[in-house]
Amino acid sequence: GVFALVTGLSVADAFYLAVVITTTVGYGDLTPVLPATKLFTAFYALLSVAVVSTRLGSLLSALFDQTNRRLEDLRRRRIVKMATKKRGAEEETAEEGLKEECGKAWRV
């Protein structure tokens, strides 16, 4: 669109050049010649790299947040499971002690 109009390239060549600039590959097979197209291309390169970096950062941040939430959930589940097992073992020990005490009382 706009890149093709400003640089005078075909839509396909403008798209190709935009991708090459945005990905910072810089093959050099298409280069701006006129001062106005050089200025526009420089501005486009800075803007596109900034936009891609920002979006990629947001995506990675969301992925890390989701992973951290899942890990925290797993930790909580593990802690609850361990506490439940411990409480169950304590209850069994208390129940055995109670049975012993009752048994002593009834064995008279």
Image (cartoon, rainbow, N blue to C red):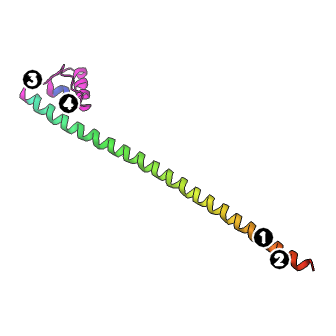
Question: Circles 2 and 4: CB distance less than 8 Å?
Answer: no
Q: Residue at x 92, y 77 (%)?
A: 107
Residue 18 vs residue 90, the one in the foreground: 90
Q: Farthest residue to the left: give it.
A: 35
Between 79 and 9, the one lying in front of the other is: 79
Alpha carbon of mark 2 to alpha carbon of mark 3: how far? Answer: 98 Å
| Disc 1: which residue | 95
**In this picture, which residue range is highlighted in magenta?**
6-35
Horizontal side of residue 84 vs 52, given as left or right? right
Query: Looking at this view, is 86 or 84 the one in front?
Result: 86
Residue 108: name its quadrant: bottom right
Task: Please tell me whether mark 2 or mark 1 is closer to you in this view.
Answer: 2
Cα separation between marks 3 and 1: 89 Å
The residue at which mark 2 appears reads as 101
Q: Which amino acid type is shown beneath numbered disc 1?
A: Glu
Residue at the disc numbered 3: 33
Q: Amino acid at mark 4?
A: Val
Which residue does the image show at 25% across and 23% down from the upper left?
16
Q: Earlier in the sequence, mark 2 or mark 4?
A: 4
Give the residue type at disc 3.
Answer: Val
Q: Are marks 4 and 3 in contact (CB under 8 Å)?
A: no
